[in-house]
Amino acid sequence: MTTGAFRYIDPASYTNSAGQHVKPWSKVDGPGTSFKLTNHKRSVENIRGRESAYSTDTSGFAVYKSPAREVSFTDDKAVREGYYKEVEALLREKLPGIKKVVIFDHTIRKREKSAPRQPVQQVHVDQTVGAAETRVRRHLPADEAEELLRGRYQIINVWRPIAHPATDFPLAVIDWRTTSPDDFIEVDLLYPKRTSFANGTGAAARNGTQNDDHDDDRGKEVARDPDSVESTENYEVKGETFAVAPNEKHKFFYMKDMTPEEAMFIKCFDSR
């Protein structure tokens, strides 16, 4: 079995001198957090050849053979107009009973030091309970959102390598059945302040809605000046994510040499 080093949030770094919890924050546009990370070695089990034993409803993740027509992911329009349709079709095929699919963003991660969206080297969950509800309200009309929130809704990431297998830098996931509610620490996501939001003059304001994708900052970041990483000036809280605290019971899994012809579903939230 393979062993990996995983970076968890350090519980001591978001507790003040009086022993009180201080909600941590993290910037979306590059380095800058209010907390520290701690490294822990964990065993990581390869699921290749046993993919059918895992599903989003049991373990919280699944891997499927699914070659995509989009292979370069360099043209944003092509991704949104072509690949999004491929992803929706795959979701409907693998998760029967879906009534509606809304793809609200995508991220192309690169390992170059100059790239603002590098792989996240920290154990985390993209959506908290509050963030998931906010997403629904942001990307759907009000009446439709209210109806959906009364039923079951899920947020699922669809992840795949680009151009070559994920051999030297694979993605690992935790079987959610090995976690505890106390493992998940809410973290505020700080976004650079934008004039359009402050003045109500952005695309969402013009359309009279709160669900215009042009007002979503994710994927529009630029690399930040390292000297300003500790400052929160000109930032505002516009999201929330879970950092994960260390737990010896966590069991990690990965798909060895995962190829661009394979896709991993990662469940971030389920209202059920």
Image (tube, rainbow, N blue to C red):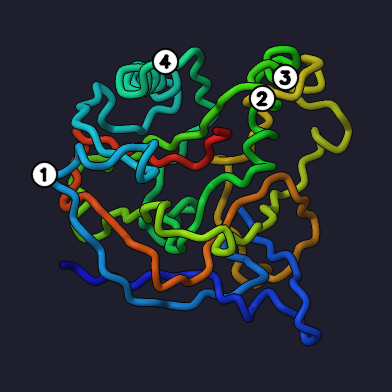
- Residue 200: x %, y % from top left: 86, 29
Residue underneath mark 2:
149
Image disc number at residue 146? 3
- Residue 181: x %, y % from top left: 57, 58
The answer to which of 272 and 146 lies nearer the viewer is: 272
- Identified by mark 4, the residue type is Gly
Residue underneath mark 4:
97
Query: Which image quarter is the C terminus in?
Result: top right
Sequence-earlier tag: 1 or 3: 1
The answer to which of 106 and 194 lies nearer the viewer is: 106
Q: Residue at x 62, y 66 (%)?
A: 32
- Residue 28: x %, y % from top left: 60, 52
Is 15 on the left or on the right of 74, as rendered?
right
Residue underneath mark 1:
49
Task: Using the numbered discs, state the Cα–Cα distance from disc 2 to disc 4 in whole angstroms.
Answer: 17 Å
Assess whether mark 3 and mark 1 are in contact (beta carbons under 8 angstroms): no
Q: Residue at x 62, y 25 (%)?
A: 213
Assess whether mark 2 and mark 3 are in contact (beta carbons under 8 angstroms): yes
Is 125 on the left or on the right of 121, as rendered?
right
Sequence-earlier tag: 1 or 4: 1
Q: Is residue 253 above or below residue 268?
A: below
